[in-house]
Each structure stands twice: as structure tokens, then as C-alpha cells.
Amino acid sequence: MVQLLDQHLNLLWEGRRTALPRHRTLRATIEWSYNLLSVSERVILGRLSVFVGSMTLDAARSIAATTEDDDTILAIIDSLIAKSMLALNIGSQPARYRLADSTRAYAQEKLAASGDAGAISRRHACYFHGLLENIGGEANRDLSAAAEEFGNVRAALTWCFSDQGDRRAGVALAAASVPLFFKLSLLAECEFWVTRAIEALDETNGNIKQGLVLHATLVAARMLTGQLDELGANHLHRAIELTEKIGDIQGQIRLIDQLHLLQLFVGKYDEALGTAKRGEAIALASNDSIAVARMRVLLSISCQYLGKFAASRSYIESALLHPDLGGDVPSRLTLEYPKRAQITLARVLWLQGHSDQATQMVRRAISDVIAANHPVMFCRALPWAFGVFFWNGETEDCEDHIDRFIVEARRHNLAILQMVGEAMKGITLLAGSETGIGLAMLKGSIEKLQSLSFGAVAGLRMPLAEALAATGHGDEALDTIDQAIAQARRCNFMMDMPDMLRTRAEALMHKSNPDFSQAELSLVQALDVARHQGALGYELRAAIALARLWQRGGRHQQAHDMLASVYQQFTEGFQTRSLVTARGLLAELSPPRSCSFAAK
């Protein structure tokens, strides 16, 4: 297929005498038709050959007209249609015109021979730059029409950065094309063109706004495609400097959002909190209420990573008071995604013991994200929402979403997110007792994420250690969870610390040489950390494990009273796996005369 594409309608590759007979026949047919055209028709046909795929009438008139007036151009276009040199598709809105590929190849040869190819290519690039700039200036821009022109935008960029091209036009076009690349989730290609444009900035004296867009875009594309390095951070800091230089508050807010995400990705959680506070201060100083709300979402997310759940809930509930926060994501370049605030609230609700509310909220949020039909946004949202399903023991509920996630992440070269998706898939397989493939997938993804210095990899080691302990690999499980705890403490990743300590206890009990006293100590620590954090969901999981350990040692009443004190704090979620388990264990631990918890 590649060979056929390389030889696509090979009209001009060989001399006419050495061309294949079918090519000679095809060329002769086109040449015969071309010779029947008037001089002006030939000129216009050559100019239209610059288009890739189809074109609108407005585009055709803008590129084809130089000295001719509109009426003349329209008459020539109608004549070319009548002579079957140009096709008209009236089924699309607006109507679109197209040259057959063979005709276009022939006409391009004539355009090159005329000496006008460079000027027409420049007009073509400038037209699509203007089109994208106009769409970018609209309050509620719709990029669906621009997506129809993507082939032409790509062709214009190719010409601009070629040896014969116009790099100044290329810089402007690359900057204007950024929202379209993100709309189409073509991040690797976006990075390619933006890199070319940044290299050309100095030689073309590109303006500050273009430089700002290009630097910001490069780091966003690199981050999502798994390149967490100093190069991206340098471009991001350069972009922030440019926003400060021109006083672009909205730009600063967007870039602080990107910097916050980069810091989360590389495990700099304290710095991420500082970045979110900086963003909130800028937003407050500018009296921008929606920006304040967005920065408080970041503050809530940072507090979750740091294990500060009460503060996290306070920030996210404050953010959600803004009526526009739950609406659509702004159409400008952003790494936000629909319902980020709602998913953030759902997580903290579960952690504080409100599992029913959390589950309902996260399911609605994911449905809304899917309805947005944007692969990058979907791949950003699902891992954050997955925590609720995982904590609830309901990973099978999002298994189909995870399969789609992996496909989309691979298709759009979202390297880190693809690895996270494979980790989620491994966790789901382990939950479904598919131990062999689940362990292999989870281990593999953790190793890849670790090689990229992905910060939250410590949290993924926990389900791996839990699965290893459950399958009789207690020593390996202990090594795994000890690595996770050490890594989490180094970067202050406290969100999962109670569950990590609980998992450590499970590993200690499943060692080849079980250490029940150390296991008990770990579980007591898990309970203490969970209580300090206000993480009732984690406290229950630790309490169940400790109650079972005490039950094994004959300390039934102590186990009952401890577990009951945790269980009684719940007001909902009584059909979830943890609470059903706790209720059954309480029934086992209760003396015959005390059945109140079993009946609840």
C-alpha cells in the first residue's frame, strides 16, 4: 500500500516516453482537456491546484483572484465545473469544490512552470492563517468548520517551512493552528510544527503573543505525550514570563494550570500547592471570579495529593459556587476537561465516607466527559475518576471506559496517559481474579512510569503489593509497598498513605515469615493517619484489617468495639463492599445478645 501511495497516479515522475502506458493515456486525456481551456481558465486551474482536498468558494476566490474581479472568477469556476475539470459537492454546507487528484497533479506542474507557485502558496497560507485567526477571535468559536480545512492547513505549514517557503507566515500559521491541533488531538504533529515555528521566531522577529502561544503549546504537547523534562519546563516558564510582560492575566491563569499539572506529573506536590496559591492570588487581584474558581479547583487537587482532605473539600465547594464552573471547558488552548471540579469533589466525598454521593457524581461526570467527544479530555478525566471506582471495589463498572481509554491514548500518542491506562487495566484484571495478566500489565506500566519519573507511581505500587500479598508473594509485596511508602514520603504524596500502611500490614502477614506484631503496628498507624486526614473511607479499610488481625488473636471484644466505632460514623453507602464486609465482621465479633449492627 505504501508503494502504491508513493507512486500515486504517477503522471510526472518519469518522462512521457518511459511512463507506463496507462499513465501516458491518462496524461494525454488530461492534456487534451486542458488544451481546450481558455488561457484564463488554465491560469485559474493552476492556482486552484494549491488546495489539498476540497475548498470552499470563498477560499477558491481568495486564492485564485489576483487581477480578476469576482464576477470573472465565478464565471471561470462555473466553466471549469461544466468542463469537468473541477467537481462541485453541493451536499456539504457550504458547498465545496475539488480537483481530481490526477488533474491537480497536472495543474501543479503548469503552476510551477508559470513561476507563480511561490506567490500562490503564500496566498494559500495567509488565507488559512486569516481563517483560523478569525475563528480564534470569536467568543464561542466552533472549530468543526476549521477541521474540514485541516489538509490545507497542514499543506500550508509544509510549504511555509520548506526551503522555498515563508517562515514568517509559518510562525503565524502555526500559532493560529494550535487550537485546531488540540481539537483533533494531534499532539505529536502539533509539537513538530510548533518546534519548527519556535526555531524560526528569532529570524522572523515573531511577536510576543505568537511566542507565548508557541512556548505554552510546546510544553502542553510534550507533557501529554510523556516528555516530562526540563526542556518543557523551560518553555513553560518562558511563556509565563511573556504573559507577565504583556499583562495577560488570562494567559497567566492558563499557564499556571499547565505548570500545576506538570508539577503533579513529576511529583512536586508542595510546589504544585504553591503554584495554585500563586494563581489564586493573581485571580483575586484581577477580580476575575471564574479564574478564582478555577484556581481553587487546583488548590483542592493539590490538597488531595497532600492528604489535606478537609481543605480540599472546602476549596472545591467554594469553586463550585461559581455558576459557570460546571459549564463547558473554554475553547481556547487548555488542559482542563469537563467536570474536573465534580470529579474532584466526588473523590473527596468518598474519602470522607460519602460513597453513594461520590459514586453518583463520578458516574454522571464521566458520562458528560464522554459526551464531549474529545479524546484528550477523556484521557485526562478518567484516571482522576477511576479512584472512586477503585476505592469502592467497583472497577468492573468502568472496564469498557478503560479499554477505550487505552485505544485513544495510543492513537493520539499520549504516552504517560497510555501507561496509566494500562495500569488501570491491570488493576481491573486483578480485581476480576485474572492474576497473571493483571500482574504483568500493572508491573510493566509501573516500570515505564517510573522510568519517566511520574510522581504518582507510588500510588500504583499499592494495588500491585496488595495483589502480590494475596497471591502468596508476601516478601515481594513487602519490598514493593516499602518502596511506595518511601517514595511517597519523599515527595509528600500523602493521599494514599493510610491505604499504603494497610497494604504493608497485609504484606507482613503474608510473608514467608509472617510478622503479626509489625502488621498490627502498621494498621494502627494507618488508622491514626486516616483519622488525622479525616479519611473515613480509608479508616474503615484499615479498621476491617485490624479487626481481623485481632480476631485471629482472640481479641474479639476489642476488635468489635474498634470496628463499630468506625462503622457508626457512616450515614450512607451501606451496600458498598467495604461496609458489607464490616457489617458481616461485626456480626461475627458480636456476642449473641448484640445484633444491632447486623440488622442495620
Image (cartoon, rainbow, N blue to C red):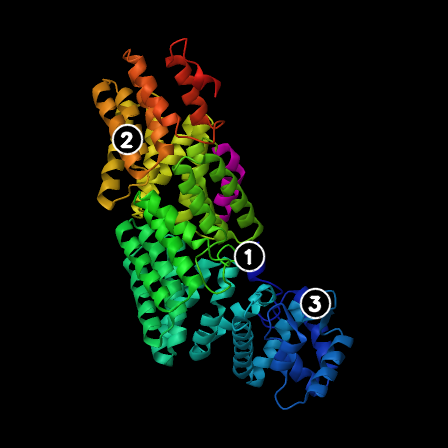
Query: Which secondary structure type mostly characterizes the magenta part of the structure?
Result: helix
Q: Determine whether the residue tagged by mark 2 lies in a helix, strand or loop.
A: helix
Quadrant in which residue 211 is drawn:
bottom left
Q: Position of residue 547 (x, y in %)?
A: 32, 20
Q: Give the residues drawn in magenta, as a range.
A: 395-408
Q: Which residue occupies the extreme right position in the image?
A: 82
Q: Tell me whether the residue at label 3 lies in contact with that at label 2, contact meaning CB atoms closer than 8 angstroms.
A: no
Q: Earlier in the sequence, mark 3 or mark 2?
A: 3
Give the residue displayed 44% in from the left and 36% down from the top.
354
Q: Tell me whether the residue at label 1 lies in contact with that at label 3, contact meaning CB atoms closer than 8 angstroms.
A: no
Q: Earlier in the sequence, mark 1 or mark 2?
A: 1
Q: Which residue is mark 1?
A: 3
Pick the quarter of the image with the N terminus: bottom right
- Residue 362 in view of the camera: yes
Q: Which residue is mark 2?
A: 526
Left or right of 367 in this view: 81: right
Amino acid type, residue under disc 3 in the picture: Gln
Q: Which residue is mark 3?
A: 93
Quadrant in which residue 540 is drawn:
top left
Q: Which residue occupies the extreme bottom position in the image?
A: 67
Is 147 rendered above or below residue 360? below
Callout in the foreground (1, 2): 2
Amino acid type, residue under disc 2 in the picture: Ala
Separation (CA) of disc 1 from disc 2? 62 Å
Q: Residues within 10 Å of mark 3 (few under 14, many from 20)?
A: few
Callout in the foreground (3, 2): 2
